[in-house]
Every structure is written in C-alpha cells, then in structure tokens.
Amino acid sequence: MKILISGGKGQVGSELTTEAIKRAYTVFSYGSRELDISDLDQLNETVKKIKPDVIINAAAYTAVDKAETEQELAYAVNSLGSENLATICQQYDIPLLHISTDYVYNGEKKSAYTEADQADPTGVYGASKLAGDNKIVSIWAKHIILRVSWVFGEHGNNFVKTMLRLAQQRDELSIVNDQFGAPTSARAISNTLLNILQNKQFNQTSCPWGIYNLQSDPGVSWFDFAQEIFAQAYEQGIIKSKITLNPIPSSQFPTPVKRPANSKLNGKKLKDNFSLSAADWRSDLTMMLGNIS
C-alpha cells in the first residue's frame, strides 16, 4: 500500500512517517514546504504522480493564539487545505484520513465529548479546524476524521518539552489546575490511524467512515500532567532535582484564546467500530522520555 502523508515533518507527521515505514508501507511524506495543501494544483500534480492508495493529512496550522491575528493563514491550511484534499481524494477515489482537534468543542461539557456533541469552537484555530472537518464531510464520503487532544511527542513543540526546558531554568513552577483533558501521544495517534488502515473493514463497503474521537486515559489537569512529567523525568535521570509545583486557576494565566475547561474525549465509537481501545498516555510518556534522554 502506498501512503501519502501531508504535514510529514510535524509533530504527528514525523511519528506517523516512522511508524508507517516500520510497518512496511511505501511512504511518501511531505512537509509543508514540499507540499502546500492550500495549493490545489500542486496537490493534484503530486497525487497524479504518486498514485497513493490512501492519503493521511497531518498538516495543520496549530498556533492557537497567533491564529487570532493570522486568520487568513490558519484558514488557508486548516480549511482550504482540507477542502483541497477532499476534492482530490474524491476525484481519484482515494480514502482520506485526517487529524482534527478537541478545540472544535467549547469545553463547557462536564463529561467526555462524543462525536454527537455540538461543535462550538471559541477561537480562530478551532473554528478553522472545524471548517476543514465540515469541508471533508460535505465533499468526500470516504473519510476518517480523528479528533485528538493535548498532543505530545518527540518531535516539534509541546507541553512535555516546555516543562523539561523550564526545569533547567527554575526550581518552582505554577501550573493551571482547572483545565482538564487527556494527553495524547503522537505515537498513539499514528498507531490508531495505521491500525484503522489495517482493519479488515477499511475501504470496504462496510467501512464505518466518519468522525472519531481518540480517547486517552486517564483524564487529568495540566497540573496533574506536569506532576507526572517531572516524576518520570526525575526517575529517569533527565532532571537532577525535584521541581516544586503550585496549582493556579486559569484566571492567573490569561491567554488570548480561552482554553477549553474540559477536553476529554470519549472513544467508545472508535472501539465499537474498529476495536481500538483508549490510549495510555503515561506509558507513552515513559517511552518518549526514554527516547529523548
């Protein structure tokens, strides 16, 4: 099977590329400078040349706060880019797997979000991602949209790397404790997408196309997540001394875009349709720290 990966140099795309090669797929992985998904002509020429069996879109504009002042760029990648991919996939009858985000929800729900819950983004980033999801749904039936939350991994910038960097500079940190969600590793996202590809139903008449939430357990606050990062980093010898953490409310850490108070995702639909269980972020964190130490 030939797989075309857009956004292949990003946090998830890099992991996805590595894992797909391990599974012996023929992989064509492009970063944004090599393949601009907002350029329909370039995308069309690339697909015509490669003739992939499936396209996985890991390309995204993810700067949540900067998106408020870079709306055109955010929509070009997240909305127009998704529309172009759906159009090309429809034209050549290619299944499309696409990564979305918890930011399409407003975070006000008390329990974990299901795919049936109303999307209601609070900022440009979430709105641009939702626009892209909607474009895919309206254009091409053969799609899997995987919504994920609190992504971390060995590549790119993320909360884990920020915490480790700050640990080298300070011995005390204040971390928000009233925003809840579930860290999700790039590895778990990659394995989920590739496991869907390997499912016997994939691209068959019975394939349950649609939107799916990837659940990761257990649910925690950012404060809880930071505690686990530092506990594991200390145990593995990545940091030499323990860090004092102080829990603070979101009001003491204002950001241009309001973060969802609850980003927990319910993965029952994914388990029911593809027999894929929730990810275990703690073990994925252990693996990540071991690989970067």
Image (cartoon, rainbow, N blue to C red):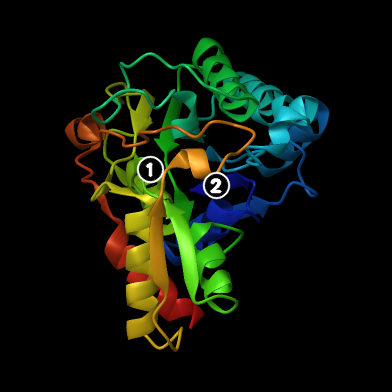
Q: Where's residue 91, x and y in %?
A: 63, 19
- Count residues near mark 1 (Cα–Cα under 10 Å), then give few for <14, some for 14-19, many for 20+: some
Disc number at residue 182?
Answer: none
SS assignment at label 1? helix
Q: Residue at x 73, y 41 (%)?
A: 49
Q: How many marks?
A: 2
Q: Where's residue 170, x and y in %?
A: 55, 75
Q: Residue at x 66, y 56 (%)?
A: 9
Q: Is residue 253 above or below residue 235?
A: above
Residue 132 relative to residue 187: left or right: right
Label 2 belongs to which residue?
3
Disc 1 vs disc 2: Cβ atoms closer than 8 Å? yes
Residue 55 relative to residue 151: left or right: right
Distance between the Cα atoms at labels 1 and 2? 10 Å
Q: Residue at x 40, y 65 (%)?
A: 245
Residue 57 relative to residue 102: left or right: right
Q: Is residue 17 visible?
A: yes
Residue at the outermost top position = 138
Q: Where's residue 14, x and y in %?
A: 58, 59
Q: Where's residue 46, x and y in %?
A: 74, 39
Label 2 is placed on what type of residue? Ile
SS assignment at label 2? strand
Label 1 belongs to which residue?
197
Q: Quadrant of residue 67?
A: top right
